[in-house]
Image (spheres, rainbow, N blue to C red):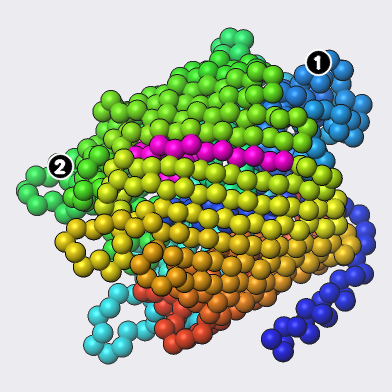
Amino acid sequence: MKIYVPLFLLLAFWCQAGFGQTDTLSPVNTEDLGDLLEDFFQNQEEESDFDYNAILENLEAYKRRPLDLNRADFEQLQYLGLLSDLQINSLLDYRAQAGKLISIYELQAVPGFDLASIRRILPFVKVGGDLDDFQISPAKMFLQSGNDLMLRWTRVLETQAGFAPLAEGESASRYAGDPNGLFVRFRRSFENRLSIGFNAEKDRGEEFFAGSNRQGFDFYSAHAFLRNLNKTVKAVALGDFAVSFGQGLTIYNGFAPGKSSLVTSIKRRGAPLRPYTSVNEADYLRGGGVTLAFAKNWETTLFASVKRTDANVLEADTSDTNDEAREFTSLLISGLHRTPSEIENKNALTQITAGGNFRFNSRKGLIGVNFLFNRFDKNFQPSDQPYNRFRFSGNQLINGSLDYSKTYRNIHFFGETAMSDNGAWASINGALIGLGKFANLALCQRWFEKDYQSLFAQPFAETAGGQNESGFYTGIEIKPFKNWQLSAYLDNWQHDWLRFGVDAPSAGHEYLLRATYSIRKKLEVYAQFRKETKEKNAPENETKTDFLTPVERSQARIQLAYKFSKTLEFRSRLEWSFYDDQILPQSSGFMIYQDVIYKPLSFPVSFSTRFALFDTDDYNNRIYAFENDVLYAFSIPAFYGTGSKFYLNARWKIFRGLTLEARYAQLFRQGDEGIGSGLDLIEGNSRTDLKFQIRYLF
């Protein structure tokens, strides 16, 4: 503390001197996504991964070449990803009645557009300007494209158990590779229409040009993508790509947020076919796809994928050499191949995925028919547990669905109903309602049968997979006074069958309340309370049969963000967490942190830094906190125990197009149990992460 406090004061004093002009090559601000990501991790009970690089890359392209609001159609405005369907229809109606916008400030006259919405889209849109040449050839696009090269190195400075030398006579497993993490990314793109690129990644502990990775990196990904070639060819994808249909009951690749403080963001949205540009080694397809417009308002998307994926494969217990006679017990999504067992599971399975949709898409509504086929070269046989009774098994699965959306006046309806090839159903339906200029309401009902089966389902729900759940969600935003916004949601659900750690049908509910006070470009303060109650197996149960007990988890938060100038911002947060299973004593915890964010407009060096203190009774009271990081790398750690965290991110614009970034982060935790577990264990009370990244735009 004696070191950090003077450092903060010195940095705050020095930062007051920043002045200058805006740099259009500055990366998109990711801090506004912090709440969304914190809530995403808070809601996860099972192993999961996420990716929203595509969102950031899309916005970066619009920042370099803004979208013309006078010429954009419904689909282009939706692809921007920053406006609701009600706002899009309101803008199109305004254009039809009043003509083209004269100025960007005219958006204030469009129903449904408040100052917050307008400020959010300002960096990415324009009004008028040069006409875009939509007949430009792919060759000309390629020649006029910009290049983006990124190199990243990461390392934990302390020695983790997986990298420690074996003691004499010890036979424990170790990581096969070195403790360096490496990432290479190249992309050549023209606006949001053409993208060609590749990624290569080596995680810490994986071999590099040796052993199981004699080809170099552990993971390679490449893609070529073309959008709006002409009136017929809307999109073409080759290599690695992502697909999203409907509300996520059949397939939805990419980041799929759930309940959050953005209480009306409940609808799944996204282009059916998108390029894949991330390093998530599970949530993508590999092959090809195309979207065609074959008549007015009619489109079809077709795709096929063949890829190797990680899985736990059982050893054959007979002399049968047929690969399909073998079984696998789970699909693995971590993408880590460091130990002999992880290396053995790498690419152990071949998965064939094919599908498509046909949809009628107009400004006022959409209706689509979706189908999906999956086949493995081995049989899937989940563990023989009661909660897995209705889970998919075998080597082939077929899904079909019907999705829709319709806007009527101030109400936008949406939904999807799906069926798997065993005859089970799943359905989700919702409505977004504009209650005048100062209020919005979101409603969502879902009903997923316990035996509905889908491998890529990511609907808006309490649990992942679109199975064994029914519930109803209500969210509302109100702006009662100038500078004030009140947000709240209530969600009730039940599960008709057993789940992992829940040995009986169960139910739960959750609510969130949030009050925000803001002064434009100067101050934002909010207070938030969230409480979740769900049934789980009672702890320390000594009877023959598990029984359920309601488990309550509550969190309260106060956050303040204040901009001293255009270059300097302070952010402070205080958060409490409470956990009560009705049997063991109630536990609690808190976290407090202070951020300093310095982004000069002309000086080439910027930075963000944080000092945090936390104290929780146990892991049940863990608190997630979004941390600023280098571009396209994200940190949302869970804080538990007693300790502190400090990090410093620095960005140096060496010259136009060339940027060097660095991150230093150090975690201290009291106690002698070390930090981490298993082969990631550090025998000590500190963990130091170092990261360097260089990006060249040319």
Callout 2 amino acid = Ala
User: What residue did someone put label 2 on?
Assistant: 325
Residue 683 sits above or below residue 425 on the image: below
Q: Let me know if residue 464 is in the magenta part.
A: yes
Task: Return the disc, 2 or 1, that comes first in the chain's sequence.
Answer: 1
Residue 295: image x %, image y %? 58, 9
In this image, 173 relative to 64: left or right?
A: left
Q: Residues within 10 Å of mark 2 (few under 14, many from 20)?
A: few
Evaluate whether residue 289 shows in this view.
Answer: no
For the point 32% across and 84% down, the residue is 166
Residue visible at 71% across and 30% down in the picture: 435
Residue 117 visible to an observer of this rendering: yes
Mark linked to residue 32 = none
Residue 229 lies, with reference to residue 196, above or below; the image says above
Q: Is residue 500 above or below residue 406?
A: below
What x and y, as percent, mark residue 637? 54, 65
Q: Position of 63 compared to 615: left or right?
A: right
Residue that carries the numbered disc 1 in the rendered image: 96
- Tell me if mark 1 has few (under 14), some (14-19) or many (20+) residues whose alpha carbon lies within 10 angstroms of its own: few
**Is residue 321 placed above or below 564 in the rendered structure?**
above
Q: Which residues are magenta?
A: 454-478
**Mark pair 2, 1: CA separation:** 62 Å
Q: Residue at x 51, y 85 (%)?
A: 670
* Left or right side of 269 for 137: right
- The percent position of residue 632, horizontal first and vertical second, equals 62, 55
- Three-letter amino acid code of the residue under disc 1: Ala
Horizontal side of 318 relative to 22 (left or right) equals left
